[in-house]
Image (cartoon, helix red, strand yellow):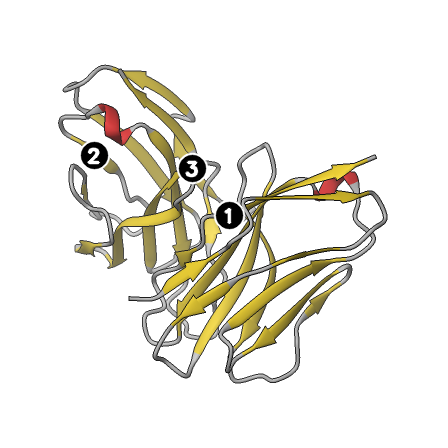
Amino acid sequence: AQTVTQSQPEMSVQEAETVTLSCTYDTSESDYYLFWYKQPPSRQMILVIRQEAYKQQNATENRFSVNFQKAAKSFSLKISDSQLGDAAMYFCAYRSAWVDYKLSFGAGTTVTVRA
Amino acid sequence: EAQVTQNPRYLITVTGKKLTVTCSQNMNHEYMSWYRQDPGLGLRQIYYSMNVEVTDKGDVPEGYKVSRKEKRNFPLILESPSPNQTSLYFCASKARDVDADTQYFGPGTRLTVL
């Protein structure tokens, strides 16, 4: 079974600064997908960014970018120019390329943005 | 609008009183799942369904039942709820297409079992 570990329960960042959330995962598979989801106080799960394991290039979506280190099984999320609306819980998630009906989630990191 | 709906959004009940949380999607997705979210544990899959009449256990199925009689609906049934089932529940759906890796989540159901 795949396990996803987020070692930072909480992170705080000053508005306009950068924060990096860490995520590591354990798998024996070579083909898989990784995701970061945002959960604001509304509880809605919002997909922030996705990474395909066979792609070496790190994914970016506007102010959000990842650092994908396949050999180290690491998948960190960088939020640049943090905004008040970025305050939320962020979940890292793993999906096998072969078991595509299941996401395995980390415990989550709560991000607070200071004005 | 593509969406997954869940009802109710909030529910307070007592131990042993059967309840059903409904889930419906309008995207004709084959895959549907139920997850529960608990502090410090993230989201864990309870049950999933790959199509009508095809369901299977996820990681934490004890105390839950599901059914998939129609493609759009995937209700979660707690026949005898207990306090340890107090949690935030999410329904999710996804197309079977291997390139379609977007999971659509419902708005969540906050369940409290007293």
Q: Residues within 10 Å of mark 2 (few under 14, many from 20)?
A: some
Chain letter for the residue marked with disc 3 in the picture = B
Q: In this rendering, is residue A56 above or below A21? A: below
For image coordinates 40% across by 49% down, the residue present is B92
Chain letter for the residue marked with disc 2 in the picture = B
Q: Are marks 3 and 2 in contact (CB under 8 Å)?
A: no
Name the residue carrying label 3.
Answer: B39
Image coordinates for residue B60, horizontal then vertical, percent:
23, 47
Q: In this rendering, is residue B92 above or below A58? A: above
Q: Amino acid at mark 2?
A: Ile
For image coordinates 44% across by 65% down, the residue present is A94
Image coordinates for residue B32, horizontal then vertical, percent:
33, 53
Q: Residues within 10 Å of mark 1 (few under 14, many from 20)?
A: many
Does mark 1 fall on the same chain as mark 3? no
Image coordinates for residue B70, horizontal then vertical, percent:
25, 48
Q: Which mark is residue A108?
A: 1
Name the residue carrying label 2.
Answer: B77
Chain letter for the residue marked with disc 1 in the picture = A
Regarding mark 1 in the picture, which secondary structure is present there? loop
Quarter assignment of residue B4: top left
